[in-house]
Image (cartoon, rainbow, N blue to C red):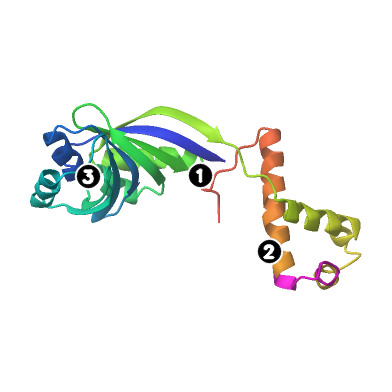
């Protein structure tokens, strides 16, 4: 199960957000690559970039590249929230400024257990965080090619051990490794879908 989560984090040490707010700009962070030391932000502005803004941002210690007239690529030392998120095992899709010292992140989590663990890690790092919204994303369906391989494997008796992987690969005109990988990915999707249908939640944080 993959969860899409909207998190609000409060911190006052984001150089990117502080610099842009000081310049009285309306902006959003379309993407952010969080890191332990440096985080990179794809910033969308509500008006064209000008030389004064670029000079101000660079004087503020930010590394800035202009993507287009309203988009900036900005790298800066990680704030407390980005630094904590980089260690939390979540995928960050993007973020936008909240009120005062807050930022609202959109993150992906491989399950509720990982999300709870990550939130505890954020709070133990001194970041005040709360969940604003959460939804479960649908699992991807098998591709047409994957279903073709699975159906042929079933018809030829592969699962009843009437044929082996080598014979199945020969029939498909593919290498053994390719067929093995196609079957593995397809069966995983089918099994995950089945578990979801009967109400069983699978987290990544399972025993190894």
Helix, strand or loop at mark 1 = loop
Give me the residue at 27% from left, 55% from top: 36
**Alpha carbons under labels 3 and 1: distance apart:** 23 Å
Q: Quadrant of residue 101?
A: top left
Q: Check residue 181 in the rendering and tell me which mark sits there, or answer none.
A: 2
Quarter of the figure with the N terminus:
top right
* Residue ID at (70%, 34%): 197
In 3D space, how far apart are the residues under numbered discs 3 and 2 (Cα atoms)? 40 Å
The answer to whether the residues at label 3 and label 2 have Cβ atoms under 8 Å apart is no
Query: Mark 1 sits on what residue?
Result: 110
State which region is magenta.
Answer: 169-177
On the image, numbered disc 3 is attached to which residue?
80
**Which is nearer the eye, 207 or 147?**
147
Q: Residue at x 26, y 29 (%)?
A: 98
Quadrant in which residue 107 is drawn: top left
Which-is-in-front pick, marks 2 and 1? 2
Above-or-below relation of 43 to 22: below
């Amino acid at each position: 199960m993959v969860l899409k989560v909207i998190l609000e984090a409060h911190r006052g040490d984001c150089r990117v957000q502080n610099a842009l707010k000081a310049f009285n700009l309306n902006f959003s962070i379309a993407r952010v690559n969080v890191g332990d030391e440096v985080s990179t932000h794809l910033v969308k502005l509500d008006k064209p970039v000008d030389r004064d803004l670029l000079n101000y941002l660079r004087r503020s210690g930010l590394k800035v590249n202009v993507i287009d007239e309203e988009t900036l690529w900005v790298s800066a030392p990680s704030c407390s929230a980005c630094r904590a998120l980089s260690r939390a095992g979540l995928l960050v899709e993007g973020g936008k400024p909240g009120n005062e010292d807050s930022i609202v992140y959109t993150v992906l989590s491989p399950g509720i257990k990982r999300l709870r663990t990550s939130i505890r890690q954020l709070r133990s790092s001194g970041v005040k965080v709360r969940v604003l919204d959460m939804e479960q994303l649908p699992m991807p369906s098998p591709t047409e090619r994957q279903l073709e391989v699975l159906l042929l494997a079933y018809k030829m008796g592969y699962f009843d051990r009437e044929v082996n992987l080598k014979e199945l690969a020969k029939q498909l005109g593919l290498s053994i490794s390719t067929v093995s990988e196609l079957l593995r990915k397809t069966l995983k999707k089918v099994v995950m879908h089945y578990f979801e249908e009967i109400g069983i939640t699978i987290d990544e944080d399972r025993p190894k």
